[in-house]
Amino acid sequence: MHAGMFPASRGGSTAAAWSPPRRRRWLIGFLAALALTLTGADAAFAQSTPRVLVFHGPSDATIDAGVAALETLGSENNFEVDPSTNAADFSATNLARYRAIVFLNNAGDRLSTAQEGALQGYVQAGGGSSASARPPRPSPATRL
């Protein structure tokens, strides 16, 4: 995890906040929320095999474990998982292929105004989204 995510003023150190049991509980909760997102998605996104876009930051042990867990969940529940670090995937045409989008441990302002607009249109049309840890922040001019 990133240093400073849980400053001492908020009651703990990074190591204590993300101990292995806590990570497992968090991951189970996150995956349950994702499963609910997938089962409740709008019929406009109906496909023969649902797809999930997993947008993540640079690879590290936490992200690799999260992507692997989502891929396992997908294979066990008949949906495809497309991991990506490429913000160019956020176009209206590309997002229409997905039933849900997962933001996995992203930090910073990674989407352009046009990409944020495509994401906003996707969500407003009934597409599901879920974020873990730190989703990409919208620019001040755009609100989702």
Image: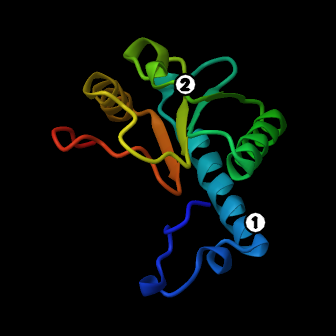
24 lies left or right of 132:
right
Q: Amino acid at mark 2?
A: Tyr
SS class of the residue under badge 1?
helix
Q: What numbered label is drawn on residue 65?
A: none
Res 68 → quadrant = top right
Residue labelled with disc 2: 98
124 lies left or right of 102:
left
**At which x and y percent is residue 80?**
71, 26
**At which x and y percent is residue 82?**
66, 26
Q: Is residue 65 above or below residue 45?
A: below
**At which x and y percent is residue 1?**
62, 60
Q: Is residue 60 above or below residue 19?
A: above
Q: In front here: 44 or 65?
A: 65
Q: Residue at x 59, y 54 (%)?
A: 33
Residues at circles 1 and 2 in contact by the CB criterion of under 8 Å? no
Q: Earlier in the sequence, mark 1 or mark 2?
A: 1
Q: Residue at x 29, y 42 (%)?
A: 138
Distance CA(mark 1)–CA(mark 2) = 26 Å
35 lies left or right of 99:
right
Q: Residue furthest top?
A: 93
Q: Is residue 95 above or below residue 101?
A: above
Res 74 → quadrant = top right
Q: Amino acid at mark 1?
A: Arg
Res 123 → quadrant = top left
Q: Residue at x 75, y 66 (%)?
A: 24
**At which x and y percent is residue 43?**
50, 27
Quick one: quadrant of the C terminus? top left
Residue labelled with disc 1: 24
